[in-house]
Amino acid sequence: MLTLFFFNSCKSNIENIKIDNKTNVKINNSIEGKILAGYQGWFNAEGDGANLNWKHYANNKQFNPGNTSVDFWPDVSELDKDELFKTEFVYKDGEPAYVFSSANAKTVNRHFKWMNDYGIDGVFAQRFVVGLTRGQERIDNYNTVFDNCFKAAKNNDRVLSLMYDLSGTTKDNVVETTKEDWKQLVRRYKLNDPTNPNVLTYKGKAVVSIWGVGFNNRKYTLENIKELINFFKNDPRYGNCAVLLGVPTGWRALERDAVSDPKLHEVIKLADIVHPWTPGRYNDLQSADQHKENYTIQDQKWCTENGVMYMPVVFPGFSWYNMKNGKDKFNKIPRLKGAFLWRQFYNAISSDVKAIYVAMFDEIDEGTSIFKIDNNPPVGESKFLTYEGLPSDYYLWQTGQAAKMLRKEIILTKKQPIYPTK
């Protein structure tokens, strides 16, 4: 996850999306038995109305051949004209390449439709607290993107939870900024109401997430986290939530990327769900298996003993070559044609976990996306990965198969399933 939304200008996009008022439809919104993805929703494009230029596409303040921060090119073949944004990149035949914007309600709705189509239960919508301190345009954009997500979840019978990423914040601004933002969202969307049919719940309470707890490079404190947990759980108007904490891989043994302070365990015990971050912590099938033995099984045991739910993270691969200006390895953690992700699904489910988080739905910056990408990307000074000959929708399909395996709708198998021929 990188340490890292405009209402009036995008009003037409929002109003053009049909939202079914399914007040009598009740979906199972419990986190147990679900595979959920992280949804960054952080891509902007020139002309999308947000006035944030090519946010998360550009590098070196430019978005053109030789300057980009993405390692995959999104598949926009299904998008309508009002969802497409022309770039300076071109395909082999000389045709211009287009991208999408997360500020476009129709596109976000399309992403949630894909989740429904392939059996992915929903998302954690990422919200970067530091961005809430960087001017009204960013705040408006965040609000627009979340509004898009909330309506899309309702429209496509998916569940949704907000995940506050604290990366980049300090002890001086993290608590009040987070609280005030949550209050305005609760007033608008009733995110702490477990009867809200598309709000993710755990043991009958709405889930809210705090990501970045206990890492050894943060400028906020465990006391800040305790204050936020108390607010989310106990505030008479804005609380009554179940709290998920995103923690380092080494949280249990207080090692690696975690602080050495045993108070971290006290903080985790105040929460309801623990969610250790793993992208980049192993890089092939063998090390994924070792992670299961050394971390997943032991983490699960600790959580069971301490009354906390354990939700592991899986990821399909990793690459941030373009973001790093070519100074890091291209295709740093290979996907192995889906074998790497499937092994992680198998390892987690065979360890009897109740839910899984996939990093990420749309993160083409770090090469962890599972949504549809262009297997014939633009050519030129920037190079892009593909899904290695697999169909554009392969990882959506595989994640849906894993969700079935988690719920015991298909047998538990280490063998990677075969994509159906049409």
Image: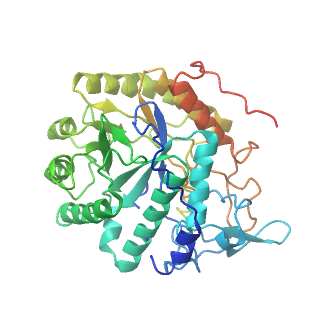
Q: Residue at x 74, y 68 (%)?
A: 380
Does residue 61 appear in the picture of this structure?
no
Does residue 75 appear in the picture of this structure?
yes
Q: Is residue 207 left or right of residue 144?
A: left
Image height of 244 relative to 379, above or below: above
Residue furthest front as drawn: 24
Q: Position of residue 382 (x, y in %)?
A: 67, 65
Image height of 131 relative to 160, above or below: below
Q: Position of residue 142 (x, y in %)?
A: 41, 68
Residue furthest right as drawn: 93
Q: Is residue 254 left or right of residue 50?
A: left
| Colour option used | rainbow
Which of the pair 17/79 is nearer the observer?
17
Q: Is residue 402 left or right of residue 247?
A: right
Which of the pair 264/59 is nearer the observer?
264
Which of the pair 131/12 is nearer the observer?
12
Q: Position of residue 249 (x, y in %)?
A: 35, 38
Image height of 316 relative to 106, above or below: above
Q: Position of residue 370 (x, y in %)?
A: 59, 47
Which of the pair 219/199 is nearer the observer?
199
Q: Residue at x 39, y 44 (%)?
A: 200
Count of numbered tags: 0
